[in-house]
Image (cartoon, rainbow, N blue to C red):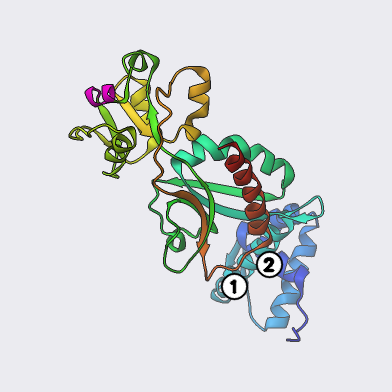
């Protein structure tokens, strides 16, 4: 497409004058004289064959023709300014919108993100968390990290790592747990997945008690309850390594169950941008290190 000549100086002068309703204030913004702004606007009016302003004793009044022209110009100048601001150090800054399960975001991803920022400073990562229920399309996400089996419709899923569940609790409660059977006498903090505690007791070779009590939609919240002595939690120790290292929590038994893996997913219809490819490769490295530690 061959574009007609665009009088950019005149268009810029008009847009600034229309925002300020003043040639003088527009001139200050553009670092030119008031006469130069007025001249450019007159040139534009002549080109269009339309009057864009009514000159009043105390300023300007934009005409209907001016009002019709202004929104397109403002949008165009804003987009150009945004594009120019995205250049940094010879790279175009890219926005990457990532969703993640809150437990993984807090316990595993955030401690590693400084490395991603240092390696890819021109990628603006925008992170939102969820409780494993997320609508990628509705939220406009490039990627999300989700827990499950990887079988999702119209989704490209790449396995990251498993995060097996085990019992975590405060030291005072851990002292009371001499055998897995002792766990049956404790308050069992649980998620909305009803099969987790029965699965753990089966792995421990203990008959499962009736599972009652509070239900949490986030392991982070569940662990906070455990830290306050509300009971024992069944969560991935991998996600709470800081609390375990500090001694705030203990893992009384080396008994695990796995209910799935974490996956990096995107819509199949979503084209992969350079920023997405950089993040995927970086995340694959981090996940490989985590699998190697298991």
Mark with earlier residue (2, 1): 2
Measure how far apart labels 2 and 1 are at the Cα level.
9 Å
Residue 66 — which label? 1
Q: Which mark is residue 177?
A: none
Question: Along the horizontal axis of the image, is 48 left or right of 267?
Answer: right
Q: Which residues are magenta?
A: 181-186
Whole-percent x, y for residue 65 in the image: 57, 77
Residue 127 is at least partly visible in this image: yes
Query: Total of numbered circles in the picture?
Result: 2
- Give the quarter of the figure containing the N terminus: bottom right
Asked where in the image residue 49 lies, by quadrant, the reply is bottom right
Residue at image mark 2: 14
Residue at position x 21%, y 32% in the image: 213
Under circle 1, the secondary element is: helix
Asked if residue 231 lies left or right of residue 112, the reply is left
Label 2 SS: helix
Which part of the image, by quadrant, shows the C terminus? Answer: top right
């Amino acid at each position: 497409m061959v574009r007609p000549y665009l009088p950019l100086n005149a268009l810029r002068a008009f847009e600034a004058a229309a925002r300020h309703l003043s040639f003088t204030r527009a001139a200050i913004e553009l670092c030119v004289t008031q006469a130069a702004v007025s001249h450019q606007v007159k040139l534009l009016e002549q080109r269009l064959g339309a009057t864009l302003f009514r000159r009043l004793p105390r300023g300007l009044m934009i005409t209907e023709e001016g009002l019709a022209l202004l929104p397109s110009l403002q949008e165009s100048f804003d987009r150009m300014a945004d594009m120019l601001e995205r250049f940094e150090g010879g790279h175009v800054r890219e926005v990457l919108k990532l969703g993640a399960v809150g437990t993984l975001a807090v316990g595993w991803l955030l401690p590693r993100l400084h490395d991603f920022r240092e390696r890819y400073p021109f990628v603006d990562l925008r992170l939102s968390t969820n409780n494993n229920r997320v609508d990628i399309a509705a939220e406009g996400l490039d990627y999300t990290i989700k827990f499950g089996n990887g079988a999702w419709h119209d989704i490209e899923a790449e396995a990251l790592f498993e995060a097996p569940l085990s019992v975590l609790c405060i030291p005072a409660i851990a002292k009371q747990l001499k055998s897995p059977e002792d766990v049956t006498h404790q308050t069992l903090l649980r998620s909305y997945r009803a099969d987790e505690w029965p699965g753990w007791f089966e792995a421990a070779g203990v008959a499962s008690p009736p599972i009652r009590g509070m239900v949490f939609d986030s392991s982070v919240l569940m662990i906070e309850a455990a830290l306050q002595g509300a009971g024992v939690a069944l969560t991935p120790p991998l996600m709470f390594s800081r609390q375990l290292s500090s001694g705030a929590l203990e893992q009384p038994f080396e008994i695990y169950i796995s209910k799935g893996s974490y996956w990096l997913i995107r819509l199949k219809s979503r084209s992969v941008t350079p920023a997405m490819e950089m993040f995927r490769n970086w995340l694959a490295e981090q996940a490989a290190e985590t699998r190697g530690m298991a």
